[in-house]
Image (cartoon, rainbow, N blue to C red):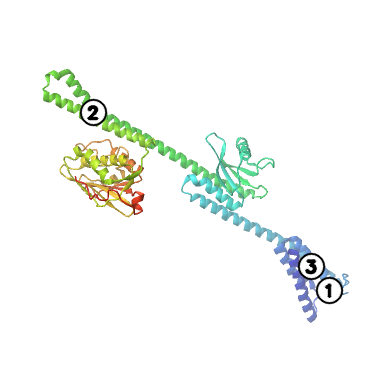
Amino acid sequence: MPYLLTSLALIGAGLAAHVVTSLTAVVAISLFFVPVVLFSALAFGLFPALYAVACTMAIAAFFFYPPIFSLAVHSSVQMVDLAIFTGVAAVVGPLADWARRSARKLKQRETRLHQLYEVGRHLAAVAETAQIPQAIAGQVMRVTGRPCAILLTGSDGAPQVAALAGGASFVGTDLSVAAGLWSSRPAMAPPDGAGSAWQMHAIRHGEQPVGILALHEASAVVEPVFMAALLELIATALERMRLAERSEIARIDAKADQLRDAILSSISHDLRTPLAAILGSASTLEGYGTLCSEAERQELAAAIREEAERLEHFLGRLFDLTRIRAGRLHPVLEPVDLVDVVEAALRRCRPLLAGHESQVELAPSLPLVFSDAILLQQALVNILENAAKYAAPGTIILVGAFHAAHHVELFIRDNGRGMTAEQSRQVFDHFYRATDRAGEPGGSGLGLTISRAFIEACGGSIVAESAGLGQGTTMRIKLPLAESTADGGDEPGSGKHGVAA
């Protein structure tokens, strides 16, 4: 095609020269063909330009210089014209070809720089560090046009495929080649024909190897400079992933240390206090029981029983927390009548609520919820205990529920000391208590933590709301509807209109 287009351009230049020479005398016929040589060199390269020079000399000698239709040239002026044309073409042709190749290289460099910018921008925008290897593989395949694999070291120290893009398979032989590259640490491992079809490049951050980039079909050449810059971008992204993982591990360790300190502090206080009371009362009965009146002995026995119950209650909550943290919480989800759960929770909390005015407002025809009845009941008991502890005697504790669009909302409202907005967000944290002031009710700070874990295990959610200190607190629980109810089916128990306090 380059030679065909050059020939057509020569024919056009020849026709133009014929028209002009028929009207006026022109000595330098070759001037008409210089643009053709320049066009051919710029568009197609050096060899089509040399072809245009040879054809120009033949056309000028055969069609324009006497004797016509002969390649012989007798005029010295015309011979000088051809010599000058040849010299000019010999200079202009290579210069034009060099300019064309330089422009192409600049265009390729601009394209590669833009591709590197896009790769860096996409990798920097990845929010989840676990998605970085797959993002790298996708970006490398996009800019190289070749299937790509990212290999990182596994727990055994051997390279493993972390991400794969392009549909090509990475088999055991390829992993063996990658393991050899990782152990020898060369810059690149080309495929050996009988082994892997992947071309592998070591990814380094400074002197530290962080992974391997594998490109399929090694016959497709990627410029070394571009590959080096691409590997630097990949190394930076992988190092960011590694630093983020280390930071997360450090954060988890710090939180574990904080939780461990809180557990030890809570145990030292919440276990020692009832144990001291039990030991004191038991020692008094043992050493001075005969000297005490019947009423005093009953009082000491009651103190032992109350402190033992308190100790059992605290140990039970620690056990619940251990189950939650160990992942051994397995709820049995089924359609549950919320009215029955509320009644059972109120019965269990009746001694604690004796000093308050409890009210229950459950909406008529309340649908079934999809939950674990036992876990939900225990969560409600913890919340009611917390409300009774912080609400002033004689105040109202309200339990209500209503049917929303896609869930049932259950709420427990008290008129206690209330909370700030910051305390409302932290109230479900481990061992968090909204107050430590003397005279305030004590506690382990585990009740609401366990309640949230139980409710979330049932597929629900819980939030704490308060208008501020002294304004009381409302716990709002959202529970998913049972499937039969959500689909508009029958609602067993829908005839209940509430429950008595």
Which residue is identified by label 2? 308
Residue shown at 65% from the left, 59% from the top: 104
Q: CA distance from mark 3 to mark 1?
A: 17 Å
Label 1 sits on residue: 63
Splitting the image into 4 quarters, where does residue 291 fall? top left
Q: Would you say 160 lies left or right of 52 here?
A: left
The secondary structure type at the circle numbered 1 is helix
First-in-chain label (3 vs 1): 1
Q: Residues within 10 Å of mark 1 (few under 14, many from 20)?
A: some
Quick one: 288 or 492, which is closer to the camera? Answer: 492
Query: Distance from label 3 to label 2 (Cα)?
Result: 114 Å
Q: Amino acid at mark 1?
A: Phe
In this rendering, would 106 be left or right of 373?
right
Q: Residue at x 23, y 26 (%)?
A: 276
Q: Residue 391: tell me if it is visible.
A: yes
Camera-side residue of 494 and 185: 494
What's under tag 3, amino acid-wise?
Answer: Phe
Of residues 81 and 142, the one drawn nearer to the viewer in this rendering = 142
- The percent coordinates of residue 456 (x first, y second) are 35, 44
Closer to viewer: mark 3 or mark 1: 1
Say whether residue 386 is visible.
Answer: no
Looking at the image, is mark 3 or mark 2 earlier in the sequence?
A: 3
Q: Secondary structure at mark 2?
A: helix
Q: State yes or no: discs 3 and 2 in contact (Cβ < 8 Å).
A: no
Q: Which residue is mark 3?
A: 85
Q: Residue at x 22, y 29 (%)?
A: 307
Q: Is residue 439 above or below residue 13?
A: above
Using the image, determine if residue 26 lies above or below residue 42: below
